[in-house]
Image (spheres, rainbow, N blue to C red):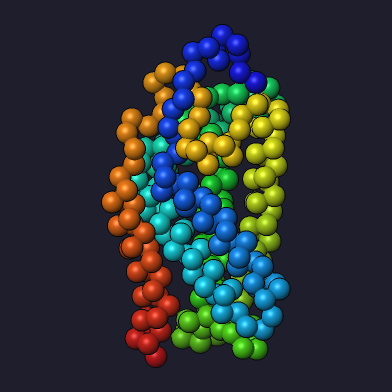
Amino acid sequence: MHDPAETATLRRALVWDLPTRLFHWLLAGAIVGAYWTGEFGGFDKTWHMRFGYAVLALVVFRILWGLFGSRTARFASFLRGPGTVWAYLRTFGSRRAHPTDTHNPMGALSVIALLLAALAQAGSGLFASDDILTEGPLNGLFSGAVDSIANRTHGLAVWFIIALVVLHLAAIAYYRFRKDENLTAAMVTGYKQLPAGMGMERPASLWLAGLFAAISAGCVYFTVEILPALLR
């Protein structure tokens, strides 16, 4: 809950650029699509694999954008040390919202955990096989131990992703009803009510985002279509 005196000094500020928002919603859709087609799509896993490739490309894009993108999206802007995370946790139960123009310390950990889980899930799918009709493009190209580890990872990582999604949704609800902070609206519009001096100084570079998207898609295409032929 915002202090009334503090609220009077707030202004509408841009915090999430368009590439970051598109990544967020596209990743959510790709994960849901991969899960649905994997569990309920029957024996034909074509669309399951396509959604998996999309997840992989999106994660690669987010890594690039987290290193070289706009300020609020960079890992260096929101990743904090254990001391800062612990200090934030001590105030977690407060009804008072602490303004930030990027991910808060707990949200930062959630972002990294989800990126790693999605990378493990989609990456292991490249080597996995259902032993029926479908196998990843890199299945069988390395040792059987690699394929076996990939199969186990692919089966386990999905549960980590589900757990992280549930925690993410619970956190959104907590911030909305406990701290009166609408995180979903900010990720849709890109804007939050913040004190003066906070927020993005200028919009993100869309041409740079487009370049990173092309690089990400190219990396996945190379891995899926070209690398298997080179290794056979």
Seen from this angle, which residue lies furthest bottom? 232
Quarter-wise, where is residue 183 in the image? top right
Quadrant in the picture for residue 131 = bottom right
- Residue in view at x 43 percent, y 77 percent: 224
Report the side of 93 relative to 9 (left or right).
right
Is residue 175 something one can see in this rendering? yes
**Seen from this angle, which residue lies furthest top?**
5
- Front-most of 118 and 10? 10
Give the position of the N terminus as an image quadrant.
top right
Of residues 9 and 85, which is closer to you in this image?
9
> Residue 52, how many percent across, how many down?
53, 69
Depicted 174 relative to depicted 142: above or below:
above
Residue sitting at x 39%, y 90% = 232
Q: Where is residue 11 in the image (x, y as percent from the top left)?
A: 46, 20
Q: Name the residue located 61 percent from the left edge and 70 percent from the top edge.
A: 154
Left-right relation of 78 to 29: left
How far across and down, in percent of the image, does residue 150 sit?
A: 57, 74
How far from the left and from the top, in percent, is residue 101?
A: 46, 30
